Image (cartoon, rainbow, N blue to C red):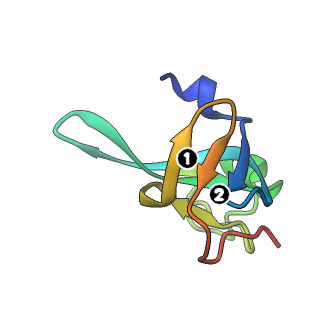
Amino acid sequence: MKLSELLGREVVSQSGEKLGHVRDVRGELTSGRLRITGVIVGKGGVLERYGIGTHGSGGPGQATVQGQPTIPWERIVSVAQKVTVLDGGDTRPT
């Protein structure tokens, strides 16, 4: 799957609660490969992707927008037409 295919997909819990859309991803580079560690859900994630709202944190690579949850990749159950997340945990955008 390409990153461009993941961005914009609707995110729902297993019980069907709408959590928003994938606006950005978090990852880490290990052994020359990018491993996704989480997805950013919520409107502020678009700003974060472009480094807006970083609060002087050093640019897009270190951006933080208050209230925009990162859903850990381990909580992702499936990626199909929608991204499905395990129920529970703090995944509601504020």
Residue 18 lies left or right of residue 36; in this view the side is right
Q: Residue at x 67, y 69 (%)?
A: 91
Mark 1 packing: few (<14 Cα in 10 Å), some, or many (20+)? many
Extreme residue toward the left, this view: 31
Considering the numbered disc 1 on the image, is that residue within a helix, a strand or a loop? strand
Mark 2 packing: few (<14 Cα in 10 Å), some, or many (20+)? some
Amino acid type, callout 2 = Gln
Residue 3 lies left or right of residue 10; in this view the side is left
* Residue 4 seen in this snapshot: yes
Q: Which residue is mark 1?
A: 25
Considering the numbered disc 2 on the image, is that residue within a helix, a strand or a loop? loop
Distance Cα–Cα, label 2 vs label 1 = 20 Å
Q: Residue at x 75, y 54 (%)?
A: 52
Say above or below: 27 vs 94.
Answer: above
Q: Residue at x 59, y 56 (%)?
A: 85
Task: Point out residue 80 in the picture as x, y percentages from the top left corner.
Answer: 60, 31
* Residue 51 seen in this snapshot: no
Say above or below: 12 vs 32.
Answer: below
Q: Which residue is mark 2?
A: 14
Q: Residue at x 64, y 55 (%)?
A: 40
Asked whether the beta carbons under mark 2 and mark 1 sit within 8 Å of each other, the answer is: no
- Closer to the chain start, of discs 2 and 1, is 2
Task: Point out residue 46 in the picture as x, y percentages from the top left corner.
Answer: 76, 47
